[in-house]
Amino acid sequence: MKASRTEDVLREHSALGDLTDLVNAGCKRDQIIGLLDLAFWTDESWQKLVGMRLPRFKREIAQVRSCADILERLNSSELIYHAAIEIQLPQFVDIHKTPSLSDQLHAYADGLDYLRKYFGPKRNPREQAWKARLVAIGYKDSSRSRSIVVDSRCARESKIF
């Protein structure tokens, strides 16, 4: 299996052992590598990452939320109620299952907004946000409120990048 770009950087900085220590302490290797991979995207353009510039990306996220709100209103209407519950038209039978399409769209928009806020290109990268997330994962996954291994690795990690 080919090492990821992140693992190569960790190896170059003699920090691959630190990753192993975190995994041995109970952290999920794939999750840590995934978050570190996202941190490297601070050098990429929004156009390259999502196929549009940031202002349009923000508008598209708002559009997804707007669509979710429209679906919620329509699904609460008397017409859709009758079509789904009383008549049971095939196109509408499943609209009241959970999570609803509206809820899924809201969650998707929230996820996009999260990615937009914490990853991707920045004029002033929020390096501390993803580092803090790694520390939180380390503490959660190692099931210790204070882990010497995790503390020392996270302290050293902040000097790697």
Image (cartoon, rainbow, N blue to C red):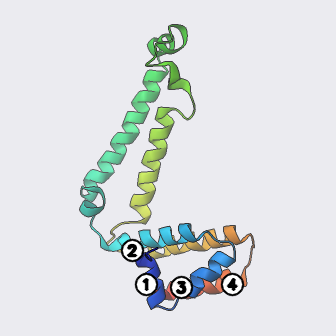
Residue designated by label 2:
40
Q: Quadrant of residue 118?
A: bottom left
- Image height of 43 relative to 97, above or below: below
Residue behind mark 1: 9
Horizontal relation, residue 103 to residue 62: left or right:
right
- Above or below for 85 versus 108: above
Whether pointer 4 and pointer 1 mark residues with C-beta atoms closer than 8 Å, the reply is no
Residue 32 occupies which quadrant of the picture?
bottom right
Q: How much space separates mark 1 and mark 2, taking CA atoms?
A: 10 Å
Structural crowding at the residue carrying mark 1, measured as other residues with C-alpha within 10 Å and reported as few (<14), some (14–19) or many (≥20) = some
- Three-letter amino acid code at the position of disc 4: Val
Mark 4 surroundings within 10 Å by alpha-carbon count, few (fewer than 14), some (14 through 19), many (20 or more): some
Residue 63 visible in image: yes
Q: Circle 4 — which element?
A: helix
Label 3 secondary element: helix
Question: Of marks 3 and 1, which one's residue comes earlier in the chain?
Answer: 1
